[in-house]
Amino acid sequence: MKLFKSTHNFGYEWSLVSAANWQKYPNENCPHVRHVDVLNRKLDPETGVLITERLLTVEQNVPRIILKLLGTDETQYVREISTIDPRKKTLTMQSVNITTSHLLTIEEETTYYEHPEDKKQTQMSQQATVSAGSLLSRWSNMVEDFSLNRFKHNAAVGREGFCKVLERFVVMAEPQPTKESF
Amino acid sequence: MSSSVGAHCTELKQKYDTCFNKWYSEKFLKGDTTPECEDLFKDYRACVMITLKEKGIDKLLAESRKETQFPSASSGDEEAGPNSA
């Protein structure tokens, strides 16, 4: 099993970050995320908590040996459940692959929350576990290493892409002084 | 805006997304929990469900939901709501 953990600051307040999250894809840094679908949504009228289940369709180049070991092609599906608490100002997303899950599991949990010392900023903490099952036997370490590196790359481009989405979001959210279109 | 896994569902999806994003920023974040966009979601979701079945993704989801259910009822309410898996 391999672990990944990171934290990051965004210089935008939590409300904006949580709204921009829904528009993170598509972005030019993350061409691997091809489709995003909302499967379920539930809003608790008392707590105001919004829970969403989504399906992400991902297509990425994968070395042939890994495709053969996993018995798959380059399309992967990821199931994500996110919970937004607008009063506590937290957005937590848990995702797991649902393709090849009997051989390899990549679980990720990302939380966006108001920076404890600066309300104008948002912190993100992300952690993931990559574990290849025993069916892969002597290949499991190699598959885990590959998956972890791929995850780190995707996490980094994901952040960069999200930064650009946030920048555009701020521009669009500002009152426009003239009628020029972008 | 992102596209749907079912190409012919993308238009329905984007109509729903537009409604949802507006509601999210203008109502939800301001404490208004009156749900909106439900009809649009129903139409879009119905379309996606067909695609999920065609591609066999429904079976993959069912496996995953056995381990982690999507919450289907509010606290104390045991009935399966319209959003249950």
Image: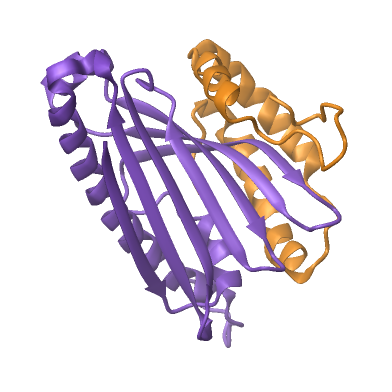
Chain colours: A purple, B orange
Image position, residue A102 (x, y; %): 37, 18
Inspect this view and state whether residue A29 appears. Answer: no
Inspect this view and state whether residue A166 appears. Answer: yes
Relative horizontal placement of residue A69, taking residue B28 as reference (left or right): left
Residue at 31 percent of width and 44 percent of height: A31
Residue at 61 percent of width and 17 percent of height: B50
Image position, residue B21 (x, y; %): 65, 56
Quadrant of the image occupied by residue A63: top left
Image position, residue A126 (x, y; %): 39, 56
Residues A93 and A127: in front is A127
Vertical side of A174 occupied by A46: above or below? above
Quadrant of the image occupied by residue A66: top left
Vertical side of A79 occupied by A101: above or below? above
Residues A82 and A137: in front is A137
Query: Number of callouts in the render?
Result: 0
Residues A159 and B72: in front is B72
Residue at 36 percent of width and 46 percent of height: A128
